[in-house]
RNA sequence: GCGUCUAUAGCUCAGUUGGUUAGAGCGCUACCUUGACAUGGUAGAGGUCCCCUGUUCGAGUCAGGGUAGACGCACCA
């Protein structure tokens, strides 16, 4: 084996082996365990959030597969209507064309072409991460069977009246020329203005001043509203205004909605361009005048002067014209929330159009109940509050999009615009008895991408066919996802799955935190702080990293700053840490926190951990590969250390599985890290050396230790495998032939990933052995302590004297003498009788037992005195603390007996220590 | 406005139902090339658990109030 772990030399080959041997498939036996991959956009490439979530999903999948469950990780990608269409349109634009030049059909075949060519990026990257979904079941949301499910759901919901078409105000993206749902609009506060404009009364008797942030919409005003009880405006209610620039007459109305405190207390009402005004327009039966075109230019409803102007140019012109007419009162600075499309960043317009909607109220009810009843569980639990809050106020879902790429709406119109919904044109004709002479044209619109995503839990299992998978893997076991798509996706899956299968889609919803950079900022291209998980695996040199971070920027002026920052932070580029280190980092960071600041230091630390595992394995193999490990029988004697490491392994295993059951991957990761490094490497491997290297040990003892070394390592590899698939597989391949494991699966090409997870074995949990080794450790550490602080070379053999040795101490000493001599490097150990006096010595305490290292020629008096002073101080504080507690009458009468007992024991310990330390201090001082 | 979350070592974070002297990794200090590993070993330093008040025998943990920050939903034209 190489001296250091080289991940790149093993990973890819390892993965190909697993995939080509079909090891990712559900076994078909055992309890079903299923995870649905949140389908990433085909346009996407793997980011840190994916890598994090995929690590969690893969760890769960591998763990349950090894536990013997019938484990399926269902994989697939999403057609991502808007995102994908934008990518392909951008390519066309670069050639100086638009999608309209190609026409719908040709454009769509271009998109399919793009998908075939570039759509596989993310799934290839997932393979680099070592993920183990069943690739043979990979699904694309526009596959035929998925499309069939989409149509089926649409038709059924329509038949039940839960999908309807209507003319309403929608969020309109004037760049994309499509409606978007509320969720696709982000409202950010921006600096703007409040214009105060004078509206003259029609009878010339005066005027009223309205305040607005959007003066250009005045072209579509159909009323001015005041509060019914606003004393200032009582006389105006019912009068008419002559709307400036248009000359239209509009009424002054009274409505509770108006806040008299805000602005002037008079609101211009534009029902076709504002959601609140729309409602008011309905209440008062106001006309709705749409003054905008689909790309947000002024349309022909407006006076000729403004027609064809962009909305923002029109704003300037209208303000100027009002000013010129003496109607502009003032302009105040004003902060306002500006709605922008989450894809385009364009300012969204409320826009009056015909769209398709899902009436969600009746679907929401059972979806709320599924969580309230505990049938579906959020982890961490408080996310259910977010869920309820949204679900209780849920609005009808606008599902039609004026795009080309997506599931086309299964609705047809005749020449009189009567609408017919059905699975296809033939069915529509039959259903509505339409003869062939009636021409039908299909609705041009497609469905919101999230409509098909909502069907993911059952559509991927073959619905509407009644398949065995549908039976077995619905509900799935756990959904692992980020909180950003609870509404977009999670809630809608619950609604749709309940509706169409009667079952819940998943039992647990594990909501992960969001990966941010090391100082808590969101990773974004414009901040230049994005890390590519693949770069952490393979490494990247500085120049390539800078180039990557500064290329293709929306705002090129930021490039210089980003380059500078990158050069400072990664002066050496990024090392190749390997997949296992990256995965382990994600696992270790997966606490309940909602923001996770990604710290490169952690990856480096866990890369070192990989190396530690690698070298520990080298040590084990060096001592076992050409030796008898007891596979074929032969007498074996297990040392105290051998029995201890098994007991310690069992303890770790138990806690590890408990942590996984609670989705506490951070705890699980820390447990195995601690066991591997601090127990197995630091202590156990050292404890085997005295056995293996000593002529005094019998062949049976050596065999027992070799057997333990190889088999604990083999168990450890299986324990670590869900988090670190590559390194464990690689080492395991070398280790398993020497172990006594009963192989599962293909015996020609065995793989760790289909072996059984280590089993908890109560018979190996041995408290006595655990406490014996703790005693040994304290003994050894005590001596090392003296060496460290007295500056005695670790190589110098020492002679130790022991005082106050109990029968129990004596037993432990006998059992562990070989280990202690070697690890503490002792030349001799002598137990002093009660009446024997000791020479001046440095001391260490192990419980009541005192270890003395005679100072003659070795020890610096002052150093030992200061060491003792420190220990004395500690002991004194402890005595004072416990005494204080125990002398408190209230504590003694109120605290549970066990707690009091514990305090008493602590006090006794501390007092006896203090006594010994005082004596020792006196002895040394006297020298 | 309604709701959720966060604040612990220089940095990034753990700390279960209140009960040892509050932990880990990284970083830092000193020593160490010892035949698994310097991506290592041994020893060590480092904390007003954001602040205040309360409940309790006992609070990092519970309650109330504040401060600072993050996020979600709804929004006033």
Image (spheres, coloured by chain):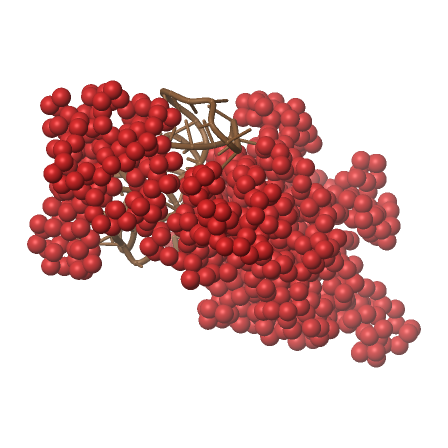
* Residue at left offset 70%, top offset 59%: A746
* Residue at left offset 13%, top offset 41%: A834
- In the shown orientation, is residue A902 left or right of residue A468? left
Task: State the image coordinates of residue A9 (x, y, percent, origin top left).
Answer: 68, 37
Task: State the image coordinates of residue A321 (x, y, percent, origin top left).
Answer: 61, 36
Q: Is residue A396 above or below residue A586?
A: below
* Residue at left offset 70%, top offset 70%: A463
Screen quadrant of the N terminus of chain A: top right
Screen quadrant of the C terminus of chain A: top left
Name the quadrant containing residue A855.
top left
Q: Is residue A707 above or below residue B24?
A: below
Pick the front one: A481 or A819: A819
- In the shown orientation, is residue A133 left or right of residue A383? right
Count the marks: 0
Task: State the image coordinates of residue A369 (x, y, percent, origin top left).
Answer: 49, 71
- In the shown orientation, is residue A548 left or right of residue A211? right
Name the quadrant containing residue A275.
bottom right
Name the quadrant containing residue A570.
top right
Say which colour chain A has.
Answer: red
Q: What chain is colored brown?
A: B
Q: Is residue A702 visible?
A: yes
Outermost residue on the right side: it is A437
Q: Is residue A419 visible?
A: no
Pick the front one: A375 or A289: A375
- In the shown orientation, is residue A35 left or right of residue A697? right
């Amino acid at each position: 084996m190489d001296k250091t772990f080289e991940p790149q030399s093993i990973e890819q080959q390892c993965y190909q082996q697993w995939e080509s041997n079909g090891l990712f498939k559900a076994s078909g036996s055992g309890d079903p365990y299923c995870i649905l991959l949140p389908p990433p956009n085909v346009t996407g490439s793997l980011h840190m959030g994916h890598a994090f979530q995929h690590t969690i999903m893969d760890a769960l999948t591998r763990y349950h597969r090894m536990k013997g469950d019938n484990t399926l990780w269902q994989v697939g990608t999403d057609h991502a209507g808007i995102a994908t269409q934008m990518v392909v349109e951008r390519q066309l634009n670069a050639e100086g064309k638009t999608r309209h030049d190609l026409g719908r059909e040709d454009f769509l075949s271009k998109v399919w072409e793009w998908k075939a060519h570039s759509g596989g990026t993310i799934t290839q990257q997932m393979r680099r991460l070592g993920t183990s979904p069943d690739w043979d079941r990979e699904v694309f949301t526009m596959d035929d069977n998925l499309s069939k499910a989409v149509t089926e759901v649409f038709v059924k919901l329509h038949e039940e009246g839960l999908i309807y078409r209507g003319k309403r105000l929608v969020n309109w993206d004037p760049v994309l020329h499509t409606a978007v749902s509320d969720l696709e609009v982000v409202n950010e506060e921006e600096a703007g203005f409040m214009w105060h404009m004078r509206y003259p009364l029609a009878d010339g008797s005066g005027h009223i001043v309205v305040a607005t942030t959007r003066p250009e919409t005045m072209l579509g005003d159909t009323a001015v509203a005041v509060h019914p009880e606003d004393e200032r405006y009582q006389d105006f209610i019912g009068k008419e205004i002559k709307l400036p620039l248009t000359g239209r007459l509009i009424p002054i109305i009274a409505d509770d909605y108006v806040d008299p405190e805000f602005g002037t207390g008079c609101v211009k009402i534009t029902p076709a361009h504002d959601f609140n005004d729309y409602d008011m327009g309905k209440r008062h039966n106001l006309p709705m005048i749409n003054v905008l075109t689909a790309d947000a230019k002024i349309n022909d409803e407006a006076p000729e002067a403004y027609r064809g102007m962009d909305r923002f140019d029109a704003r300037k012109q209208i303000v100027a014209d009002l000013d010129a007419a003496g109607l502009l009162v003032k302009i105040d600075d004003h902060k306002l929330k500006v709605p922008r499309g989450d894809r385009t960043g364009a300012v969204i317009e409320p826009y009056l159009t015909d769209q398709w909607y899902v009436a969600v109220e009746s679907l929401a009810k059972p979806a709320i109940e599924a969580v309230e009843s505990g049938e579906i569980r959020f982890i961490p639990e408080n996310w259910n509050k977010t869920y309820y809050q949204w679900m209780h106020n849920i609005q009808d879902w606008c599902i039609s999009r004026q795009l080309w790429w997506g599931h086309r709406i299964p609705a047809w119109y005749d020449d009189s615009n009567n609408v017919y919904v059905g699975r296809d044109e033939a069915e529509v004709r039959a259903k509505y008895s339409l003869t062939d002479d009636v021409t039908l044209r299909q609705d041009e619109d497609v469905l919101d991408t999230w409509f098909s995503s909502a069907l993911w839990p059952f559509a991927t299992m073959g619905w509407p066919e009644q398949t065995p998978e549908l039976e077995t893997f619905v509900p799935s076991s756990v959904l692992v996802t980020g909180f950003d798509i609870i509404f977009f996706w999670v809630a809608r899956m619950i609604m749709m799955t309940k509706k169409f299968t009667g079952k819940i889609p998943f039992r647990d919803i594990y909501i992960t935190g969001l990966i941010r950079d090391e100082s808590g900022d969101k990773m974004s291209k414009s901040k230049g702080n994005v890390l590519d998980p693949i770069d952490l695996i393979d490494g990247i040199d500085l120049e390539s990293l800078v180039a990557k971070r500064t290329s293709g920027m929306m705002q090129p002026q930021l490039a210089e700053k980003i380059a500078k920052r990158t050069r400072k932070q990664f002066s050496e580029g990024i090392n190749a840490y390997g997949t296992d280190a990256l995965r382990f980092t994600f696992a270790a960071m997966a606490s309940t926190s909602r923001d996770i600041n990604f710290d490169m230091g952690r990856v480096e630390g866990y890369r070192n951990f990989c190396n530690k595992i690698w070298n520990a394995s080298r040590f084990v193999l060096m001592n076992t590969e050409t030796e008898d490990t007891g596979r074929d029988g032969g007498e074996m004697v297990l040392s105290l250390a051998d029995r201890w490491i098994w007991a310690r392994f069992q303890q770790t295993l138990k806690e590890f599985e408990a942590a996984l059951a609670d989705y506490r991957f951070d705890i699980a990761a820390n447990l195995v890290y601690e066991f591997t490094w601090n127990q197995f490497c630091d202590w156990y491997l050292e404890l085997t050396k005295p056995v293996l290297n000593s002529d005094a040990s019998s062949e049976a003892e050596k065999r027992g230790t070799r057997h333990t070394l190889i088999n604990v390592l083999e168990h450890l590899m299986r324990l670590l495998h869900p988090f670190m698939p590559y390194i464990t597989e690689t080492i395991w391949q070398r280790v398993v032939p020497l172990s006594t494991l009963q192989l599962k699966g293909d015996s020609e090409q065995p793989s760790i990933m289909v072996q059984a997870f280590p089993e908890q074995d109560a018979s190996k949990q041995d408290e006595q052995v655990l406490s014996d080794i703790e005693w040994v450790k304290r003994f050894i550490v005590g001596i090392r302590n003296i060496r460290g602080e007295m500056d005695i070379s670790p190589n110098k053999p020492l002679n130790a004297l022991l005082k106050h040795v109990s029968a129990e101490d004596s037993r432990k000493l006998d059992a562990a003498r070989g280990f202690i001599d070697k690890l503490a490097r002792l030349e001799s150990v002598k137990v002093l009788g009660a009446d024997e006096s000791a020479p001046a010595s440095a001391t260490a305490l192990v419980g009541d037992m005192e270890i003395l290292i005679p100072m003659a020629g070795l020890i610096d008096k002052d150093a030992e005195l200061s060491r003792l002073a420190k220990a004395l101080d500690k002991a004194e504080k402890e005595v004072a603390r416990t005494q204080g507690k125990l002398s408190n009458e209230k504590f003694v009468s109120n605290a549970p007996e066990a707690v009091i007992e514990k305090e008493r024991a602590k006090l006794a310990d501390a007092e006896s220590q203090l006594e010994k330390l005082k004596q020792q201090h006196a002895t040394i001082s006297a020298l």
